[in-house]
Structure formats: structure tokens, C-alpha cells
Image: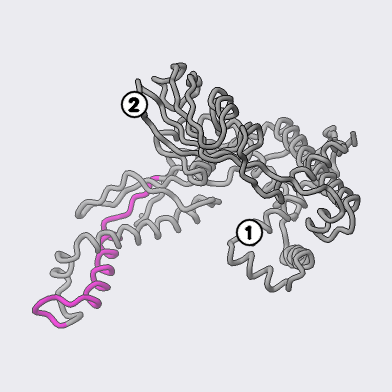
């Protein structure tokens, strides 16, 4: 009978549970090896280094030796499980229900997240529409106005401020004549950062003035008990500033970049907006394709993979423990769609040999280097240092998969 017995206890798409039993003889052998390693390294009172009896070493370092034995047994058992069950894990297993008693088998469970087997009977024949929004003169003008605002200095005002002006104010809630929750803010009027009643009152004040107004707290106010209540607020307007927009002429265009005239700047802005519109159209086309492909093949997002992705989302967005349940409920559809998409891309890439090659990566890095006017080696080192090489490989793989899939369907330009 083998001294490590692995038994599958449960299986579902994306996850497998295994029960492991390690025979007492294998446990004792692991304990002897761990004890011998400690005996060589440690020095105990009354003994030369490496000469302390194993029984003394075991008593002195019982917890540490036990921990090392557990790590070794789990590692050996995991190797047996991989070979026996032919698993394709996507991460290291989780261990639970560990039982470790003297002169008895060590038992535990391995919870393994695995890549589910996927069968895609239909990869093409979908009807897709690629719609590129038209770039209008209004859109170009709005972009140029934004460039003007970024270049415009803020100039102090001595008059009443209006929408778009920058103000510094102190707000305090009044209880009788006593001020509560006194705070200083800097905000741009019209951006919705302050309650409408407060903004309206600020626009009837001059810098240095103090005023009061009554406001109703909104229904989404952070404190549920205060939602909808009326509050009297005291406002001190310390400072107001307004942007002085630079003249819209050829000189402004030259300040923005390598443009000889305002008309040349307009053409460049239009080209950028058209390229962005094309990218958005391509992204929407891919979304349509994946949505139809997933529906046609009944692709299911395995719960363990969705839960893993939700956990990573929560970590990125720094969601507190008290909000995790609400966050998971809200973001689960997004995570499920992402898991389905990733499963399809991995399956197609594997089946048709579409994964990014070293040559693909080198060519992409060379293209990036040309755009940056840099050496390819510098770009490679920069991506490697930032941990983004795998992201680049993944991006290339996705492009190849989508290109292959789109060839199997009908795309209509709108």
C-alpha cells in the first residue's frame, strides 16, 4: 500500500477537492529528516554544535520541526496528486482540515483550482456590426477648449464667482450659533462637489465675505440617520479665482506642440479623436463577438475562478472587509464575463497555436521603441522591471485570437 494516498472527494467546474492520507511510517521518516537537519545547525547548552541527541533537539524545537514536516508532507503529496489526477492547476492548492497526531496518519484536504475543460462547437458564423462614431467639429472644438483650460493660469477675483471658477471656502454646520464639522475646501463651481444650495450661495458672495444658507442633506448622504434633514450652513469665502484662457491662434498651437498653425492643430486633434473612435469601435466589435460566442456555446464561468477574480478586484480597489459582500454582489457579473472571455481566449489560443511567440514580443517591443525613439533593449528592460512583459504577451495573444475569430464571422461596417 502506498504511503501517500490521494482520493478525489469532490469535483466541479474550476475546482477539485482531494483527501490526502500520509502513513505514520512516512511521517516518522520526515520527522527524522527534519530533526537531523536541525541537529546539525543548532547549538544547545552542554553539547557541541551538531552533537545534541535527536530526542533533545526534537523536544527543544518541537513546533518548528513539526511545521517543517507539514510543509514537506504537503509538498510531496501535491506532487503525487498532480501525477495521479493529471491536474492542470491555475494556482497552488489550499490546505484545510489538517490532522497531525502522534503515531497516526497525517490527513488533510487539498482544494485545487483548475482550468476547466472547454468545448466550443461553434467559433464563427456570427453577424457583427462595427460602428465608428463620426468625429464632429463640436468634438474637436471641445478638445481644443480643454487644451486651453489646461494652459490657462488662475487669476484672483474680487467679484462674485460663477460656474467654472475655483474657490476656497470654509463650511460649518450651525447648531444655534455653535459651529460643528468645520472644514476647509477647494472646489470648482459647477462640478457638483458641493450641494446645489451651497454653490448658489457662494455665487452671491465676494472673497472675504461670510454667509449662511439652509440645505437639505441628500438621500445618499453617508450617515443614514441624517439623510433628508435640513441643516443651516455657514460659509466663509476665502478666495476665488478664474482662468484666463490664452488666445486661440497660431501662437497657441505652437505652444501645444510641433504645429505651425491653429488649423494644423485642429487636424491633429481630429486625427486623434478618429483613432480613438476606431479603437472604441474595435473594442465594441470584440465585445459583440465574445458575447455571441459565449451564448452560442453555453460557456459557464466556474465559481472558484469568479471568486478568485473578485478577490483580486477587491484588493486592487482596497475594499474594506465590511463592504466585501456588497462589492462581490455588484461586481460578480463583470467578473463572470471576464472569466468566460479568458477561458475562450485560452482555449482558442491553445487549440490553434495562437499564443504570442518570442518573435512576436520582439517585434512589438521594437515598434514601441520606434515610437519612443528608444533602444529596444531599454524598452524590454523597462517592461521587465515593471512586471509588464506577461501583460504584453497576453495582449498579443488576444489580438491574434480575435483576428482569427473575426475571420470566421461576418462584420458589417456602419
Residue 160: x %, y % from top left: 61, 32
Corner quadrant of residue 167: top right
Residue found at the far bottom of this picture: 48
In reply to whether residue 41 is colored magenta, the answer given is yes
User: Is 323 in front, or is 97?
Assistant: 323
**Which residue in the protein does label 1 denote?**
390
- Predominant SS along the magenta part: helix
Residue 229: x %, y % from top left: 44, 17
Q: In whole angstroms, how far apart are the C-alphas of marks 2 and 1? A: 59 Å
Mark 2 falls on what kind of element? Answer: strand
Q: Callout 2: 10 Å neighbours few (<14), some, many (20+)?
A: few
- Picture layout, residue 360 above or below residue 13: below
Query: Range of the magenta residues?
Result: 19-48
Q: Nearer the viewer, mark 2 or mark 1?
A: 2
Q: Is residue 177 visible?
A: yes
Which quadrant would the C terminus be assigned to in this image? top right
56 with respect to 274 (left or right): left
**Which residue in the protein does label 2 denote?**
178
In reply to whether residue 256 is colored magenta, the answer given is no
347 with respect to 197 (left or right): right
Amino acid at each position: 500500500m502506498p504511503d501517500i494516498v490521494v482520493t478525489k472527494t469532490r469535483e466541479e467546474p474550476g475546482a477539485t477537492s482531494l483527501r490526502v492520507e500520509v502513513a505514520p511510517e512516512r511521517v516518522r521518516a520526515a520527522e527524522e529528516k527534519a530533526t537531523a537537519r536541525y541537529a546539525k545547525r543548532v547549538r544547545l547548552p552542554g553539547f557541541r554544535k551538531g552533537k545534541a541527541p535527536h530526542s533533545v533537539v526534537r523536544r527543544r524545537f518541537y513546533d518548528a520541526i513539526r511545521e517543517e514536516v507539514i510543509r514537506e508532507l504537503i509538498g510531496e503529496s501535491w506532487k503525487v496528486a498532480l501525477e495521479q489526477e493529471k491536474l492542470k492547476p491555475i494556482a497552488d492548492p489550499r490546505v484545510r482540515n489538517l490532522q497531525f497526531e502522534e503515531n497516526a496518519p497525517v490527513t488533510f484536504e487539498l482544494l485545487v483550482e483548475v482550468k476547466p475543460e472547454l468545448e466550443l462547437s461553434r467559433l464563427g458564423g456570427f453577424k457583427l456590426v462595427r460602428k465608428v462614431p463620426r468625429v464632429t467639429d463640436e468634438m474637436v472644438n471641445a478638445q481644443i477648449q480643454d487644451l486651453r483650460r489646461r494652459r490657462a493660469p488662475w487669476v484672483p477675483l474680487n467679484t462674485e464667482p460663477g460656474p467654472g471658477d475655483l474657490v476656497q471656502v470654509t463650511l460649518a454646520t450651525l447648531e444655534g450659533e455653535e459651529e460643528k464639522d468645520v472644514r476647509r475646501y477647494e472646489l470648482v463651481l459647477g462640478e457638483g462637489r458641493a450641494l446645489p444650495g451651497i454653490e448658489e450661495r457662494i455665487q452671491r458672495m465676494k472673497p472675504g465675505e461670510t454667509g449662511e444658507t439652509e440645505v437639505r442633506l441628500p438621500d445618499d448622504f453617508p450617515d443614514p440617520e441624517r439623510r433628508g434633514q435640513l441643516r443651516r450652513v455657514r460659509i466663509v469665502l476665502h478666495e476665488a479665482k478664474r482662468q484666463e484662457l490664452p488666445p486661440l491662434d497660431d501662437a497657441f498651437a505652437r505652444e501645444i506642440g510641433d504645429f505651425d498653425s491653429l488649423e494644423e492643430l485642429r487636424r491633429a486633434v481630429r486625427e486623434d479623436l478618429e483613432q480613438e473612435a476606431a479603437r472604441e469601435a474595435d473594442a465594441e466589435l470584440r465585445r459583440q463577438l465574445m458575447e455571441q460566442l459565449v451564448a452560442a456555446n453555453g460557456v459557464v464561468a466556474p465559481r472558484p475562478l469568479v471568486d478568485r477574480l473578485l478577490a483580486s478586484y477587491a484588493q486592487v480597489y482596497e475594499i474594506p472587509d465590511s463592504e466585501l459582500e456588497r462589492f462581490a454582489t455588484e461586481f460578480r457579473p463583470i467578473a463572470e464575463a471576464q472569466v468566460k472571455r479568458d477561458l475562450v481566449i485560452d482555449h482558442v489560443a491553445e487549440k490553434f497555436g495562437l499564443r504570442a511567440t518570442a518573435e512576436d514580443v520582439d517585434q512589438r517591443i521594437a515598434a514601441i521603441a520606434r515610437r519612443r525613439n528608444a533602444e529596444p533593449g531599454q524598452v524590454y528592460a523597462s517592461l521587465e522591471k515593471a512586471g509588464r512583459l506577461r501583460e504584453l504577451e497576453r495582449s498579443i495573444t488576444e489580438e491574434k485570437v480575435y483576428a482569427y475569430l473575426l475571420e470566421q464571422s461576418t462584420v458589417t461596417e456602419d
